[in-house]
Image (tube, helix red, strand yellow):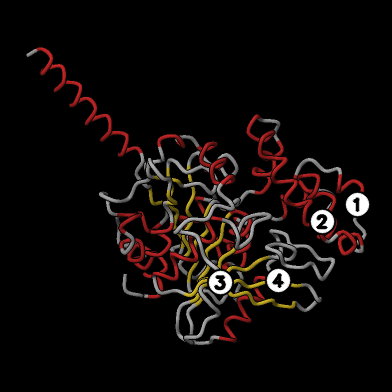
Amino acid sequence: MMFLAGGVIAGTGLYFGLKRYISNCRIEILGQAAEEDEGFKGMRALLDACPSLTDPTQAYLIPTAYLCGGMLQTAYSSIQTLKRDSASDIVYDREPMIMSDGGTISLDWYPQRATDSSQPIVIIMSGVGGSSYEYHIRCLAKTLDKAGFCAVVMNHRGLGRTPLTSPKLYNGGDTSDFRDTVQYIHDSFPEAPLLGVAFSMGAMLLTKYMGEPSALLAGGIVICCPFDMTLTGRLLDADTFANKLSRPLIVSSQLRIVKRNYDMVKSAGYDMDALMRATRMSEIDTIVTAKACGFKDCWELYEAGGTAKYVDHISAPYLVINTMDDPVVPPRGLPLDKIKSNPNTAVAMLKHGGHLGFFTSNLTPRIWYLTPVVEFLQAVVKLPA
């Protein structure tokens, strides 16, 4: 009898403990769309069409048990880059695109270059040094295709096996290539609604573009966007244990681009010896990006290149997805005052997920944000769920 009573007590404690844990994993919506008054109903209606974000029975992310911290989520995302499984095993239809200065980007379409003139097209951009080959990008492209969208990934200059045919390199502060890409797709498919989804550095570009008066996108989603580049730069530059593990991987990915295109990069007049000795992203940005943009060093570049000021001018539905435990883009860097003052913008804030992680499910981790991304974009273009 005592054993049975003990079991009941333990079971009850476990039940309420799990219930409280799930409650702490719920998603918080920030912005005017989260207000209870009449306010702006457009974004609220879009979010109400996203049960994975607003339905109390679904709107939570319980992290994979062995990926319970932001650092672990972030690290796991990094080592998954080349993974292939049923969710990500795709083949792109590549279209090279020559820019006005002779530089080259590549558009990777999935499953093929758009053929239906009215099918919604989602333009995807990766984070720094990333490309269409990354695991989460491939998963997203395949998920969007199943939901009725045509996906196209923009690979920046020198990335995703795209040849560097001009001394100009990509950077998170220059929207010109993305602007030209959107215009090209719009001109090719004038009846197709265009949408954007971008990650990390790509999210900076998408945010800036959507704040420009000539923006052609019907809506956009940014995931782990570093609105405050000075803050993110300082965090990446700090001598923490996590950085000592991840920094060599990030830097080596950038230097690989330089090595593959050494003569072309050298022709721009950069200090190649210093560049090849770089061990931090701040050094690379000072040697290359800051010089190219006319700044003294990376810190002056980061200060001038903040993304927050563009939020005021966004006039299409724009959703930010960020986590409380992101070691690269902490919540204190989000421009919540600007997001709350613009009725077209909202934030879905998660307790867990790290930087570009968002892994849930205990046995085989799966990416959580694929479902809300599809739901939100379907709501924007009014596709059937």
Label 1 crowd bin: few (<14), some (14–19), many (20+), radius 10 Å: some
- Which residue position is annotated with label 1? 272
The image's mark for residue 258 is 2
Q: Give the image location of residue 261, x and y in percent.
A: 83, 61
Q: CA distance from mark 3 to mark 1?
A: 34 Å
Residue 335 lies, in percent from the top left, at: 54, 51
Kindly state the secondary structure of the residue where label 3 is placed. Answer: strand
Query: Label 2, label 1: how many angstroms apart (C-alpha)?
Result: 9 Å
Mark 4 touches mark 2? (CB < 8 Å): no
Q: Secondary structure at mark 4?
A: strand
- Taking the image as shown, residue 180 lies to the left or right of residue 275, namely left
Please report whichever mark, 1 or 4, sits nearer to the chain's N-terminal start: 4
Q: Could you give the CA–CA distance between mark 3 and mark 2, rounded to whole angstroms?
A: 26 Å
Indicate the secondary structure of the residue bearing disc 2.
Answer: helix
Alpha-carbon span between mark 1 and mark 4: 23 Å
Q: Are marks 2 and 1 in contact (CB under 8 Å)?
A: yes
Name the disc covering residue 152, or none: 3
Density class for disc 4 (Cα within 10 Å; few <14, some 14-19, many ≥20) is many
Tell which circle, 2 or 1, labels the residue nearer the N-terminal end. Answer: 2
- Residue matched to label 4: 105
Say left or right for 95 vs 193: right
Q: How many marks?
A: 4
Q: Quadrant of residue 8?
A: top left
Q: Residue flagged by tag 3: what amino acid is it?
A: Val
Q: Nearer the viewer, mark 2 or mark 1?
A: 2
Contact (Cβ within 8 Å) of mark 3 with mark 2: no
First in residue order: circle 4 vs circle 3: 4
Amino acid at pointer 2? Val
